[in-house]
Image (cartoon, grey):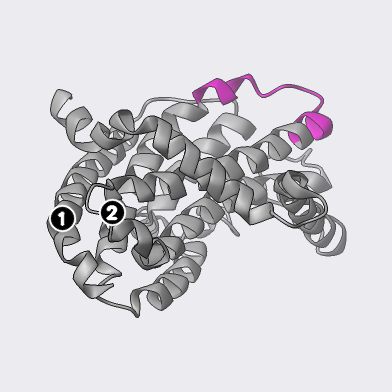
Amino acid sequence: MKLMRANIFQEFIQHRFLISQLTKKDITQRYRGSALGFLWSILSPLFTLAIYTFVFGFIFKAKWGIDTGESKADFALILFSGLIFHAMMTECLTAAPTLMSTHSNFVKRVVFPLEILPWTTLLSSLYHFMMSFAVLVFFYIVVNQTFPVGIIFVPIIMIPFCILLIGLMWILSSLGVFFKDLSQIMQMASTLLLFTSPILYPLSMVPEKLHFLIYLNPLTLIIEQMRDILFHGSFSLTQNLLLYLSISCILAIIARNLFKKLKLSFADLL
């Protein structure tokens, strides 16, 4: 555990103030010049949820099938609970390949810790996830007239997910310097991740013998755990989640070491 902390979180702890400042700058720049500013971080997921509620709840009258008393808004809430994870992963994976070229001024500074740049993108995407999650919880309370006390377990499933993302970003941001097409590949990968995870459909619709393929998608387990917490009121620290955490930590350690080796060539290529 000490080794994992030293390898994965070393720069995060050492440069936490710089990371926080860069994250604030990244979030601020996104809304700079807009009339509503930071309100867009709430209005955007709110609009998305309203659209899904109207289209699936009132036009298609879709049902997820969790129980016979399912309301028209339930489908949209269940759908939205998966979409916010996909949005967070997409934001990270599509930004990572161009992260070094976007911050080429930092790359050319010998003393700048380049390892922290993926952390700033991760925290920025986590901020937008939290805004979307707040909208989800608010409307869950409105629809169900109860507070989902199980959300206290959400950080437990977010930790392995974030570790996985930082690992993937270290890999993609370093390889993106060498392979310019990686950014386009990640755009296609985002679509693949959407349709091969139970976001738009329940896992029960997939033949049981193919479940292992769906679980190869890193979104599947996290989304299923989130829905268990919110809509079934249950959470258990399963072997699958512990395996997910272990794989995420191993990937992050390997990714960080790869990044530190490849970053020596960044300045020459950029």
Quadrant location of the C terminus in the rendered image: bottom left
Could you say where residue 39 lies in the image, as x and y percent from the top left?
Answer: 77, 45
177 or 56: which is nearer to us?
177
- CA gap, disc 1 and disc 2: 8 Å
Return the disc, 1 or 2, that comes first in the chain's sequence.
2
Q: Is residue 208 magenta?
A: no
* Kind of residue sitting beneath label 1: Leu
Q: Which residue is mark 1?
A: 258
* Kind of residue sitting beneath label 2: Trp
Secondary structure of the residue carrying tag 2 is helix
141 or 40: which is nearer to us?
40
Mark 1 neighbour density, 10 Å: few (under 14) some (14–19) many (20 or more): some
The quadrant where residue 100 appears? bottom left
Q: Is residue 234 left or right of residue 8?
A: right
Q: Assess whether mark 2 and mark 1 are in contact (beta carbons under 8 angstroms).
A: yes
Quadrant location of the N terminus in the rendered image: top left
Q: Which residue is mark 2?
A: 170
**What secondary structure prevails in the magenta region?**
helix
Looking at this rendering, what residue extends furthest in the right direction?
Answer: 58
Secondary structure of the residue carrying tag 1 is helix
Mark 2 neighbour density, 10 Å: few (under 14) some (14–19) many (20 or more): many
